[in-house]
């Protein structure tokens, strides 16, 4: 499916929802009538806000760490972390998202919020890498860790947002903050802890 067709589907089938805990960031998000099943078996993770990304976006908005910096949202999904970085004054915001639907969602959601997010296909030189919910399986973790190591070796700081999933590499992380947030699938009023970490590959473990 072409990008224009994906854009039309997202803007037609998904509902704009505002996130009051994230500076009223608006996203096209799934709802029971979205018809996402017609897209096939691949999980439409880009149509939801996940706990790690939500916590990381909160941290970016609360802490003065992106102002004037070149920032990459790695595994951007809906683009919520990239949008938060743009709102918080980053000089330039880039997003690396391998899935075509995800790339379209990032572009559509950035436009919805009136911010500039540039999509890239490989790891660029940046000051800061933000990655929320990228350790949801052993297979994905094995692909992500070398990328984070390369980013650190190139001089970037790397921050990870995660609610404590099984494949989170805790031996390489230093906890910076914790929030109680909603995750995909949580009912109204249900929250869970999700933390933001510094990724430090030189730590033992």
Image (cartoon, rainbow, N blue to C red):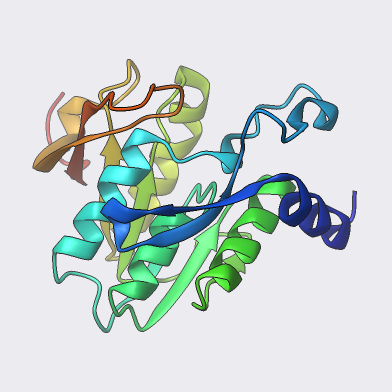
Classify the position of the C terminus by image quarter: top left
Label count reads: 0
Q: Residue at x 16, y 41 (%)?
A: 202
Residue 134 placement: quadrant: top left
Q: Horizontally, is 93 left or right of 202 in the view?
A: right
Query: Would residue 103 appear left or right of 26 to someone viewing this image?
Result: right
Q: Is residue 180 above or below residue 99?
A: above
Would residue 32 be visible to someone looking at this image?
Answer: yes
Residue 74's spot in the image, x, y percent?
Answer: 46, 52
Residue at the location (28% across, 27% down)? 189
**Residue furthest top in the image:** 166
Viewer can see residue 72: no
From the viewer's perspective, is 49 left or right of 70?
Answer: right
x, y (%) of residue 165?
Answer: 32, 20
**Residue 115: x, y in percent?**
49, 77
Give the residue at x 59% y 41%. 47
- Residue 87 on image: x %, y %: 34, 73
Query: Residue drawn 65% across and 63% down?
Result: 108
């Amino acid at each position: 499916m072409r990008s224009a067709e994906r854009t039309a589907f997202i803007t037609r089938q998904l509902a704009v929802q505002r996130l009051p805990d994230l500076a009223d960031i608006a996203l096209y998000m799934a709802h029971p009538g979205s018809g996402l099943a017609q897209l096939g078996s691949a999980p439409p993770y880009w149509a939801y806000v996940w706990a790690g990304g939500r916590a990381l976006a909160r941290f970016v908005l609360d802490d003065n760490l992106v102002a004037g910096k070149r920032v990459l949202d790695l595994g951007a999904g809906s683009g919520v972390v990239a949008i938060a970085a743009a709102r918080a004054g980053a000089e330039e915001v880039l997003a690396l998202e391998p899935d075509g639907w995800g790339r379209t969602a990032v572009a559509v959601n950035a436009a919805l919020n009136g911010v500039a997010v540039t999509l890239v296909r490989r790891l660029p030189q940046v000051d800061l890498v933000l990655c929320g919910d990228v350790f949801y399986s052993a297979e994905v973790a094995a692909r992500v860790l070398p990328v984070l190591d390369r980013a650190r070796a190139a001089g970037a700081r790397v921050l990870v947002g995660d609610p404590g999933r099984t494949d989170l590499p805790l031996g390489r992380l230093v906890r910076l903050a914790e929030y109680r947030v909603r995750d995909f699938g949580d009912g109204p009023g249900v929250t869970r802890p999700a933390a933001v970490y510094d990724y430090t590959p030189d730590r033992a473990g």
